Image: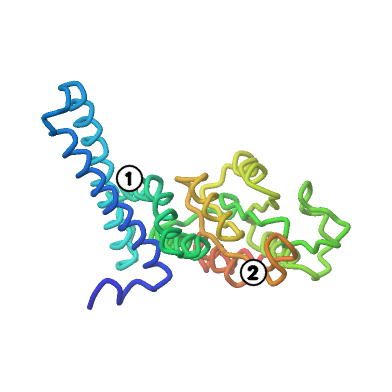
Amino acid sequence: MSVKDFIPVRKRLFVGLLGASVLGAGALLTGIWFLAINPTRTLFDQILLVILTTLLMGGTLLAALGIGGIVLTILYSKDLTAFHGPIRIAVNLFFPIALVIGKIFHIDSEKIKSSFVEVNNDLVRSKALRLKPAQILLLAPHCLQRSDCPYKITVNIDNCRRCGMCPVKDLLELRDASGIKMGIATGGTLARKYVQEYRPRAIIAIACERDLTSGIQDTNPIPVLGVTNERPFGPCFNTSVKIPDVEKAVNFFIGEENYETAVNNQ
């Protein structure tokens, strides 16, 4: 059986575009190398081009190794420590190129980012993490709150009256039951403020694909499990989230037994 038989389509999209990015970089390296060995070039130009080629080649080889690490991690659901650095290089250096390639082939950027979130979640789940509830930060977007609610919660989340008209009530009950930290963010600046304030060892982030992608990259190397919100009325307006998906993320980080114990002790 081939690799594609084991990796779901949504994850193959991101991995495939990363691979295409590395191949593109390889083609660029070949062109630079031919320029470097061109006898019409001055010795100084040749040295500069050789140095540039060497640096790019090193980055490309590490990225290729990182892509291999991503595939192996997904296939075996096992954290491969030796690949952490190459995986980080592959994502940070070539993800922007993957988006450009996707645009060239008219692939929706939201699909690519959604694929990235899926791959990221698999990489996080491959780690043997067992954390205390207080070490986990749940970050939720302010658009989960009803737009006509007069009780604003971005400054103080406990201003919520828990009327049940939006998912914030359920998230607060999950926070209280499990003992995790929680913050409502209006954007990346406030989200980073919560990260600096609580200094979590892991994050559960609820957001759209775009914000999840940027947030996962911004907080690296803190492991982030992304939960995509639902947008029945369009982006950033009266959004929703599947609470069981958030509970699964909490269970992963603190362990299902510890979660059940915390809930029973409330």
The relative height of residue 233 versus residue 133 in the rendered view (above or below) is below
Q: Is residue 132 left or right of residue 232?
A: left
In front of the other: 48 or 75: 48
Q: Are marks 1 and 2 in contact (CB under 8 Å)?
A: no
Label located before the other in sequence (1 or 2): 1
Identified at 25% across, 33% down, the residue is 52
Residue at the limit of the structure toward the front, as seen here: 40
Q: Is residue 213 left or right of residue 30?
A: right
Residue at the limit of the structure toward the left, as seen here: 39
Three-letter code for the amino acid on which mark 2 is drawn: Glu
Which label belongs to residue 152? none
Three-letter code for the amino acid on which mark 1 is drawn: Gly
Say which quarter of the image contains residue 122. Answer: bottom left
Q: Quadrant of the N terminus?
A: bottom left
Label 2 residue SS: loop
Q: Which residue is mark 1?
A: 85
Identified at 27% across, 71% down, the residue is 3
In front of the other: 17 or 204: 17
Q: CA distance from mark 1 to mark 2?
A: 33 Å
Q: Which residue is mark 2?
A: 230
The relative height of residue 178 versus residue 46 in the rendered view (above or below) is below
In front of the other: 95 or 217: 95
Identified at 55% across, 60% down, the residue is 209
Q: Residues within 10 Å of mark 2 (few under 14, many from 20)?
A: some
The location of residue 149, given as percent across then percent down, is: 85, 61
The location of residue 238, given as percent across then percent down, is: 75, 65
Say which quarter of the image contains residue 199. Answer: top right
Q: Quadrant of the C terminus?
A: bottom right
Identified at 30% across, 68% down, the residue is 75
Q: Is residue 74 left or right of residue 158?
A: left
